[in-house]
Amino acid sequence: MPLLPTTKLSRADLADLNSFLAVESHRSFSKAAVELGITTSALSHSIRNLETRLGVRLLNRTSRTVSPTDAGASLAKRLAVGFQEIGGALAEVDRHRDRPAGRLRINVLSDGARLLFNRWLPKYLEAYPDVSVEVAVDDRMVDILAAGFDAGIRYGGTIAEDFIAVPISEQLRWVAAASPRYLNRTSRILVPEDLKNHNCIQIRTGQGVIYRWDFEREGDHRVIEVPGQLCVNETEFGIQMALSDRGITYCPEERIADYISRGELQVVLPDWAPIEPAFHIYYPGRRQMPPGLRELIDLLRTESGSW
């Protein structure tokens, strides 16, 4: 079979070269497969086809590692420049379109999915029918680059400094809340330290640590390591347990606004509720912004003002 032509590349050639570049960048077939949206076996087949056509081994593979050969490293270096130019050219063409088209992969923490995407993603999908969106809801701190996502949504202050982070909501008021039945049968809560005598629903964060609850009143900031029989890693489950009279939960007030208005949950220590950073959408600054991401950011920033 002839080598890749120097003046004309087929669609298969470009796809295989792009697959190779993804594997070389991640040093992992599984991570590259996630980024490309294909199976690991299909990706491995693509790389084998490319190596066969070139007649050169590009990657050294073991059961644990993937690394480029000298030929592979040289090819990857030049491909990175070439595909960057291609991406820039496509982005330039896209600016002449009436509306964006393409595929977006977004990693969103569960609070962001429920408070932002549940409300406004349908409006985005209707406005931009040529953009397909994949949403992964995950409260863990995910390396969005390694996992192949275009952007992520997390709370401000938790995002690495090498990403561009844009606020897409108002600041968030955090509250402790419980059912009236729980509060009626337990001791009164007058100051944050009183929580140490209560059954609090602990929260394990995406970093794997149990969260200490923050409270603030007129500049007096207190951090409480709360006790509890139950520990959860997802806000919604904590809310449901509080509704079942299992203890006090802690979350953005907006998450439980409906339950509060119906009297199913009651905020404790309302004068101590701190105002914390907004939701931010973040993405790598060294990459060309994918089509549709700017429009998503603009919509979320506009609509969040209606909270």
Image: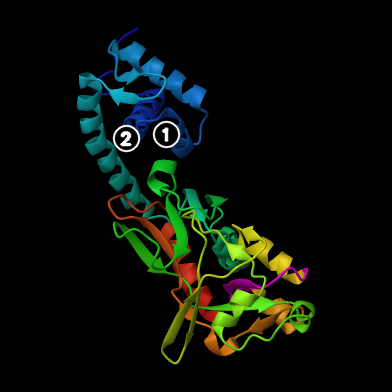
- Does 265 sit above or below residue 227? below
In terms of sequence position, does the residue under pointer 1 or pointer 2 come before the other? 2
Name, please, the residue furthest toward the bottom.
Answer: 218
Magenta extent: 244-255
Position of residue 67 measured from the top left corner of the image (x, y, whole percent): 30, 25
Residue labelled with disc 2: 25
Answer whether labels 1 and 2 touch (C-beta < 8 Å): yes
Q: Amino acid at mark 1?
A: Ala
Q: Nearer the viewer, residue 115 or 231?
A: 231
Mark 2: few/some/many CA within 10 Å (<14, 14-19, 20+): some
Position of residue 232 measured from the top left corner of the image (x, y, whole percent): 62, 58
Which residue appears at 40% of the width and 24% of the height?
A: 64
Whole-number angstrom distance, CA of label 1 to CA of label 2: 8 Å
Position of residue 227 measured from the top left corner of the image (x, y, whole percent): 60, 68
Q: Nearer the viewer, residue 128 or 218?
A: 218
Q: Nearer the viewer, residue 186 or 37?
A: 186
Residue labelled with disc 1: 32
Which residue appears at 29% of the width and 37% of the height?
A: 83
Report helix, strand or loop for mark 2: helix
Image quarter of the N terminus: top left
